[in-house]
Amino acid sequence: MAIKVLLFAQLAELMNAKELVVENISSTNELIGVLEQQYPVFKGAAYVVAVEKDIINANTKLNDFSTVALLPPFSGG
Amino acid sequence: MAIKVLLFAQLAELMNAKELVVENISSTNELIGVLEQQYPVFKGAAYVVAVEKDIINANTKLNDFSTVALLPPFSGG
Amino acid sequence: MSEKIKNIFIRGAISPAFIADGIQKHQSKTSIGGHSIFLGQVRADILNEKKVAAIEYTAYEEMALEKMHLIREYIFQKYPLTCLHIYHSLGIVEVGEICLFVFTSSAHRKAAIDACEETVERLKLELPVWGKELFTDDSHQWKINK
Amino acid sequence: MSEKIKNIFIRGAISPAFIADGIQKHQSKTSIGGHSIFLGQVRADILNEKKVAAIEYTAYEEMALEKMHLIREYIFQKYPLTCLHIYHSLGIVEVGEICLFVFTSSAHRKAAIDACEETVERLKLELPVWGKELFTDDSHQWKINK
């Protein structure tokens, strides 16, 4: 189970990375738990979660090669 | 008492003139009465009346050299 | 904003290059965050089986400029605008060409957007300007605004 | 209007000439009576005594294009539009330059005006795009939309 995690804006800057690959993860809640434990910057960070480009509002099951994006508040335009 | 009457759009076309000078007139109602009597095209024509560039809503006294404009429905833009 | 009365009338169509020039000139005004633009374009309407080829605009120019000045003052009082520019064609404007250009600018978008719309609505109602629809068969009809 | 997904992103600022070109191209569409345009311009904001010199835009491009496609379909269903074009800058856009260009066209003005405003509001809320405000002292801050 390898999950691709895309990071943008503040999160990419704080992590100094645009992409992480995380192993052995089966849901978005599990992913967030692991990230917050490993990287304190995720605690208290403002972002929404998108799975395969759709924003989710509840815990979502992940498959092998799922792409999860962590999206800070949008500020386009 | 010479009143300058400005005509625009349909009215200028129907009258084949952009300007009339009418003598011996002391109010807008009197002017309109005289025009309707002399030129049947004014009867039933749709227009508003402006005296010195201000649209009037009631009979208005005219002075020598007053400028009265007869304005068909606007269709700019 | 008690400026002197500005001319708004342009002979013939308003060109895209003129609009671009207007936009370009605002790039030095760095307090602006948003521009709203309305463009009126002459439509190839079909009326009683006749097709519009062009519109010929005339105006009671002195009165129109005075009324436009009052609308400008009202709009500047109502909305926090940086700029408001209005251009209207006189004479012949062919189908597909632009006859009206309203351009508002403000720090935040809402003021520019609302002011642009209200300016367009008001000038269509209040300016003594007339459009004569010239048909392809050389006949014509006086335009009626909805 | 189930077209294929269109790109909306442009590298760097959107030039007035590009906007003029967009307007010019619509002159052959003679069913159009009105265009509404919104332009976002980078403002020289002062935040904690620091002055913005430019904004650097990044996006989750694939997701943004999918979301924009859905917004387009929604807007075309809601309003009788002839055209809807959207361009957003990526990368650095200097103060005074244009970073967003939304362009709607319709037979009658109301549809173009309302559709333009709603498209601007929706894309600001829904597109995963971020602005990094670059200050004149080389520090920066992530932009917050109101």
Image (cartoon, coloured by chain):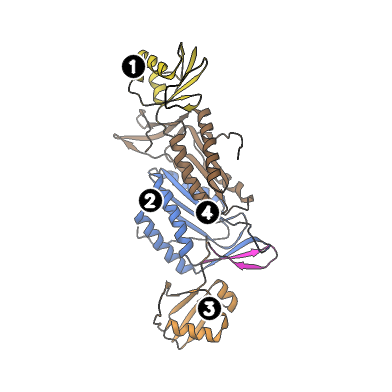
Chain colours: A orange, B yellow, C brown, D blue
Type of the residue with mark 1: Pro
Specify whether residue C2 is painted magenta.
no
State yes or no: discs 2 and 4 in contact (Cβ < 8 Å). no
Q: Secondary structure at mark 1?
A: helix
Q: What separation in Å lies between label 3 and label 2 (alpha carbons)?
A: 40 Å
Type of the residue with mark 3: Glu
Q: What separation in Å lies between label 1 and label 4 (alpha carbons)?
A: 52 Å
Q: Which residue is mark 4?
A: C109
> In the shown orientation, is residue D29 left or right of residue B3?
left
Type of the residue with mark 2: Leu
Decide: few, some or many residues near mark 2? Use Cα within 10 Å; few <14, some 14-19, many ≥20.
many
Q: What is the x, y in percent for residue D55?
A: 60, 62
The image shows residue C60, relative to residue C20, as above or below, that is: above
**Magenta stretch?**
D129-146
Q: Which residue is mark 3?
A: A19
Q: What is the x, y in percent for residue D84?
A: 42, 54
